[in-house]
Image (cartoon, grey):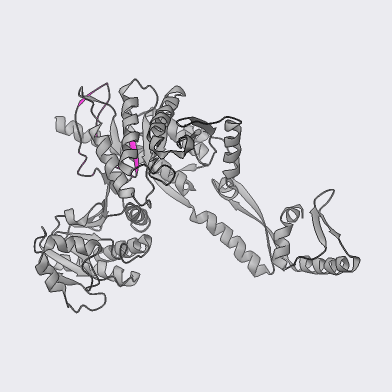
Amino acid sequence: MPEMVKHFSEILSLVGVKKSTVEINPTSSPSPCVHLTGPRCEVEILKENLESWLQSLVTERFEVDGPGVQPFFQGEGQQLQSHFNSAKGQRTLTPGDVLEVNGTPTLGCSKIFFMECVPKGGKKDNSGQALHSGLGRVLALCEQHSWGSVALPIIGPGLALSVPVKDAIKILTDEIEIFLSGYTGSLHTICITIMPNYAHSEEMFQTVCGNLSAKMVDNTGQALFHSLTTDLDEVILAVDGIQLHLVFGDITNETTDAIVNTTDFTDFQTGVCKDILTKAGSQVQANLTGAQVQRGKIFTTQPGGFPCKLIIHVCGQRDSSVIKSLAKEIVIYCESGHYKSVAIPAICAGKGGMDPSVVAKSILQGVKDAVQGANPMYLKTVRIILLKINVFLKFKAMAQQILSVNKQLTAPAHLVPTHSTTRGRSATTTGGSVSRRVRRSRSLPSSSFDLSSLVASLPVTQPTAAFLVIGFTYDNVFDACQEIRRAYDNQCSTHSFSSEDIGCLTDDEVDQLRSKLNSLHLQMRQSNADSWVMTGLKDGVNEVVRLVQGALRRQQLSMVLERTLL
């Protein structure tokens, strides 16, 4: 088989061929074969062994079908490298220079900007000016090419430049302010991305929120941009008679009737436990000292100085089944005690070191089990308070999987709707973010938008990835084929939209939707007269979901503002 020639060295390793004085040269021309060169006796022995080994192998041609399957398995790193080399050529970049490189289909963007930030001689003291120049150049290029959106990371705090986090963010937000102070015709979305697991993610988020909120209105009272939106907006889910809130924030700021403290009942000076007890006071800690609590049971105390009616202390034992049981018992206890609301942290996801996804599944399932069919009369609100960005995102993703309910996104309390004089645009703030968008309104929702026509206009493709699977036994090969299929399936997702949701998109957003469906290899089909189903790789599906949710939030906020003005 021609494919075996290209990967013959891996096949030799698979069958256990060791290095010898015989030279092995596979070739596919004029037909697939292997040339052996060396001492005659050793060549004969290796030839017989190779024939035996190759005949014993099991081969299977296998195909995986689905949207985005080819770029998923092929990867596009080499293509991007080729684009970079072509764009750079013999050019020497100086600090502040920006190199425009063509994007790749899977990345879903037209261009990637490479910015030279390291000053000559490696003097980091001058890196700030290079950042100013480079970021200003990027924004100017977007406007020059009439691009509608750009994603910018926080550049500088890493080892290469060592710019303090607050300074790096100030440079970025200052350049955004300078750009928006002038005339802009096409760029309507600036997305500031923050890696959830970065050491300073939370500090970055708060600083970006503060800086951009302060810059919404210039010194003349005019709004520089339309709105701020976020991936960390509070999520509210209706679950069998209660409201379940996923909140990115600090549990010590909560004012619910009951507060849950997570502790091992021995160490009260770390994590969430320390924060809660510091606010509650020494008497509450004294009540905990020496407490004998059975595995999977709750322990309650008076609130002390904490602004609540009761503190519920639990130990998750770093065990998912225990955490699930505790979440269920917390809800049942609050209902029986006539408490209307309770705040729960991510038990064992911090100091406990457990996988946030495992913790999320346990807590959410425990809450769901507690209220399912129970028709609670008193408990109306369960707030899950998540201090870390990555933990919040894991809970948000898990909630979409295990809670079959509709969700509503609301703006964080510290960024409330704001009215101001604008240059012909709305200036409403909603949210603060990991993926933070500074957005300018471009047009009103397109009431005549026909999604059927858009989908029909997209190129028709038959996405298939073909494999030749080689192994020692049929079972080995079968298992490998299944693993290949699972690898693709695990990176795919499906999301449903109502026709009403899609109808909230502006003309610009419809163009973005068309571009994303095409470049991210997504498929859309109509499930019924009022519903559409989108399928594809998770990252691509999530991009479209964020686009539609942003339109929905804008519409909801407009309705709130209209009622307020009335």
Task: Identify the image quadrant of the C terminus.
Answer: top left
Residue 421 magenta-drawn? yes
**Residue 62: x %, y % from top left:** 65, 56
293 over 531 or under it: above or below:
below
Q: Nearer the viewer, residue 160 or 529?
A: 160
Q: Is residue 556 above or below residue 31?
A: above
Task: Kindly report the secondary structure that dominates the magenta region of the rendered protein.
Answer: loop
Closest to the observer, 217 or 327:
217
Across and down, in percent, residue 543 comes to: 42, 42
- Kindly tell me whether residue 401 is visible in this rendering: yes
Rendered location of residue 268, percent (x, y): 21, 68
Q: Is residue 183 left or right of residue 245?
A: right
Can you give x and y, in whole percent of width and height, for residue 490 in the image? 49, 56
User: Camera-side residue: 251 or 401?
Assistant: 251
Label total for image? 0
- Height in image: 352 above or below 406? below
Quarter of the figure with residue 147: top left
Q: Residue furthest right?
A: 40
Task: Give the side of residue 29 with respect to residue 103, left or right.
Answer: right
At 36% from the left edge and 55% from the top edge, which residue is drawn? 394
Would residue 354 appear left or right of 215 to someone viewing this image? right
**For residue 373, what is the image quadrant?**
bottom left
Question: Is residue 300 magenta-colored?
Answer: no
Which residues fall within the magenta stretch?
A: 412-437
> Which residue occupies the foreground of this view, 500 or 261?
261
Residue at the spot 34% in from the left edge and 37% down from the top edge: 437
**Hey, which quadrant is residue 321 in on the image?**
bottom left
